[in-house]
Image (spheres, coloured by chain):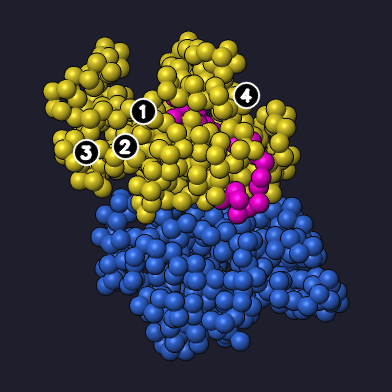
Chain colours: A blue, B yellow
Amino acid sequence: MTNIKAIRSAASRLKGYVRETPILTSPFLDEIAGKNIYVKAESLQHTGSFKFRGGWSAISEMSEKKRKNGVLAISSGNHAQGVANAARAFNTKSVIIMPEDAPSLKIANTRKLGAEVILYDRLNQNREELGAQIAKDRELTLIKPYDEPLVIAGQGTCGLELAKQCKGLHISKADVIVCCGGGGLTAGIALALEQEAPEFTVRTAEPEQFNDVAKSLEAGKICRNHSMSGSICDAILTPEPGEVTFPIMKKLCGKGFTVSDEECMRAIYLAFIRLKLVLEPGGAAALAAALFHSNKIDCENVIIVATGGNIDKETFTKALTNYN
Amino acid sequence: MTNIKAIRSAASRLKGYVRETPILTSPFLDEIAGKNIYVKAESLQHTGSFKFRGGWSAISEMSEKKRKNGVLAISSGNHAQGVANAARAFNTKSVIIMPEDAPSLKIANTRKLGAEVILYDRLNQNREELGAQIAKDRELTLIKPYDEPLVIAGQGTCGLELAKQCKGLHISKADVIVCCGGGGLTAGIALALEQEAPEFTVRTAEPEQFNDVAKSLEAGKICRNHSMSGSICDAILTPEPGEVTFPIMKKLCGKGFTVSDEECMRAIYLAFIRLKLVLEPGGAAALAAALFHSNKIDCENVIIVATGGNIDKETFTKALTNYN
């Protein structure tokens, strides 16, 4: 079950292993948005994204026998590294299926974290079928990136942390904007805040043409994106909201934001110069929403979940060179 | 007096205003150094460096009357912003004397933080005389950047925080490497750790040709640098250790490190790609020492104080482009 109890249980398993990521502010960002902006920097989590939480949550809850056989994940990036790193800590074999055209740094990092990487051909192979076959043949447990209760519970621990930190900052009412792919983090945070900070409203940020969650929330049912490539926000490009995550988001979330790639690049530059943070495009979408769409925010306090920092140096350099 | 009591008192004044900066790690950095590397990211402090601690400590301890008159600081960068930001929070006027060739972003930021900036000509004007004159004429209180007990006490709060965090990480013995200019932060941390983590050894990191503290520690007396420009580590270029800070460092610190500008640039790249941190050259000196001079470190655990992240985008881009 995906509920607050599962999130609290994940938090107790993660205790001492997950990093409590800081909440950062800058008067310069407040000025741009005309709001109080608080940035929760999950880019500083182990492996550079919140995904470590879900990976650890899932692996730590497996039976000894299953864990001994090993785990499998299908991911081109952050989920791959999060699962590989958590598996390594449990001395568990991890097999990660990655597209052969994934950034070479991400493939190299995943291998260095101890995973066996299996590359597939994006055009001619179905990764789900491939994954299911390998999992079956080698008795590996598949860890899905978002539509999996234990993963959602792990991501939800970010919400518990956020609620605790906001109490310390005396923030009692806020919009919480989360960079959103399949909705694992969004749903987890929404469930945590429903209990711990009921005056907070969770809202999603997605790139143009990949705003399936915003569209689905508006329509009240799952809507699919038309395209599957064409945004720089690689970490949050998913075809549609998850079957487990969507009902939670539908019940608990406010209206979603849609941001352009260019707005994400500007947000990357501003996070660099004002917060001294390295964000990847998909990890900067929520900040872009707060800075450039603040006319759609009623609340004075805006909490941003900056979800990841796994960006290559060429893209980062481009953001610094072309924006200010 | 500069002692643990003053540091604890500064910590109580800073409570709720200073950020507890996180300690970050990466298995990739551990591999390079052959050590366990822990990075305390003071680059994520308010205004992008630890200097906010000292500025707040000094201003919060002033009498109401003096505080009402205002404060003055002489600085081309981080101390300027730290003092300006702290003064603003106390509704105190701040006057900052900056060289007219200081980076325009730093001048603009200092102004935006509410300070009156007075520019001087580095070649033809003596900034100390100018500062003394203005302070006298306008009844402002001068806040020195490091050789001032209240400032040292403020910087020392970073050491208290570090000791507490290391207990949580079960680190009982470590070398602590601090990027060092005049020695305010180094002395403050050394005093804090003498009480709170007596098995830790504080060591300095300085750029080539500006290793006055390393030389002074070796000679047992204050030695001066020959040049006053010529390193990219602008935040930590000081002519000699302070009269207040040196005796503390002499009593408590281990052998200092000297690093090249190129090593700092490589450390900036590695902090970007492995920790998702933005560091400035002077704020990366300690990381450079740990990564590239680990043969001079006996201890298995190395704690780095990454002191600042106020770097312009041109220099950062250069580090990303030229190093890997």
- The amino acid sitting under disc 4 is Lys
C-alpha separation, residue under disc 3 versus residue under disc 2:
10 Å
The answer to whether the residues at label 2 and label 1 have Cβ atoms under 8 Å apart is yes
Secondary structure, mark 4, is loop
Secondary structure, mark 2, is helix
- From the viewer's perspective, tell me whether residue B133 is left or right of residue B300: left
Which residue position holds label 1?
A: B148
- From the viewer's perspective, tell me whether residue A89 is left or right of residue A234: right
- The amino acid sitting under disc 1 is Glu
Comes first in the chain, label 2 or label 1: 2
Q: Nearer the viewer, mark 4 or mark 1?
A: 1
Residue A258 location, x and y as percent? Answer: 40, 70
C-alpha separation, residue under disc 2 versus residue under disc 4:
30 Å
C-alpha separation, residue under disc 4 versus residue under disc 1:
24 Å
Which chain's residue wears label 1?
Answer: B
Outermost residue on the left side: it is: B137
Query: Label 4 neighbourhood size at 10 Å, few (<14), some (14-19), many (20+)?
Result: some
Q: Nearer the viewer, mark 3 or mark 1?
A: 3
Whether labels 2 and 1 share one chain: yes
Dot label at residue B58:
2
Which residue position holds label 3?
A: B63
Q: Residue at x 49, y 14 (%)?
A: B222
Which residue position holds label 4?
A: B255
Which chain's residue wears label 4?
Answer: B
Range drawn in magenta: B165-186
Secondary structure, mark 1, is loop
Magenta run includes residue B175: yes
